[in-house]
Amino acid sequence: MNNKEKMLRGYLYDATDLELYKLRLHAKDLCFKYNNTKPSDTKKRQKIIRKLFGKTGEIFNIESDFWCDYGYNIEVGNNFYVNHNCVMLDCNKIKFGDNVLIAPNCGFYTAGHPLDVEKRNKWIEYAYPITVGNNVWFGANSIVLPNVTIGDNVVIGAGSVITKDIPSNTLAYGSPCKVVREINEQDALKYFKSEEQNVR
């Protein structure tokens, strides 16, 4: 089993492996090209992302700057939006469903390092997947760590560090991120204003 296979299976692997190094360089070159393409050149930008990612939906928009490790391990659904300064360390799979919104300065990190200093100093790593369901909104400066699954219809509050799974239909925030409550029917009315309310 080579290091690329070990990486995707969640085993300890050598991050200095030449094949992995070349794959990372390729991805980072594409990220650099993307980040230096005019925001108005949407066709070129979409073409780069489709080349970089393992899967995309029909509609997506990723603001610059965006960085990832490999790219091909990232799969996104339809109506996918990422605001500025997102980092995805996709040493293992990062999968997003449909209608996902990601605020600025968010990170999705599948990679980790051993606590044992001898292994860590040899650049040995591990990587576990991240899975995000449909209709999920991440507030600014949220961080998702390895081996986390987030359900459907979830809202993650700003500044959260997600270390464990988050169930569907919930509002969660904090460091570490915890479920605060379920999202309910009253939330549909919270930001609603009628025309009469707007008349002064």
Image: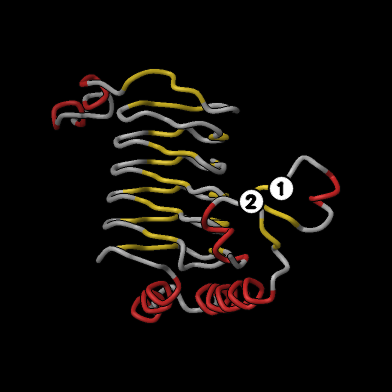
Q: First in sequence, mark 2 or 1: give its number.
A: 1
**Residue 132: percent from the left, percent from the top?**
38, 44
Q: Is mark 1 on a helix, strand or loop?
A: loop
Crowding near pointer 1: few (<14 within 10 Å), some, many (20+)?
A: some
Looking at the rendered structure, the number of numbered marks drawn on it comes to: 2
For badge 2, the amino acid type reads Tyr
The image quadrant that residue 170 belongs to is top left
Left or right: 43, with 65 as reference point? left
What mark, if any, has residue 79 been given in the picture? none
Mark 2 = which residue? 126
**Residue 67: percent from the left, percent from the top?**
56, 64
**Residue 31: percent from the left, percent from the top?**
54, 72
The image quadrant that residue 153 belongs to is top left
Mark 1 = which residue? 113
Q: Are marks 2 and 1 in contact (CB under 8 Å)?
A: yes
For badge 1, the amino acid type reads His
**In the depicted view, which residue is nearer to us: 6 or 191?**
6
Q: Residue at x 53, y 28 (%)?
A: 177
Q: Which residue is drawn at 25% across and 66% down?
A: 58
Q: What element carries label 2?
A: strand
Question: Marks 2 and 1, how far apart in space?
Answer: 6 Å
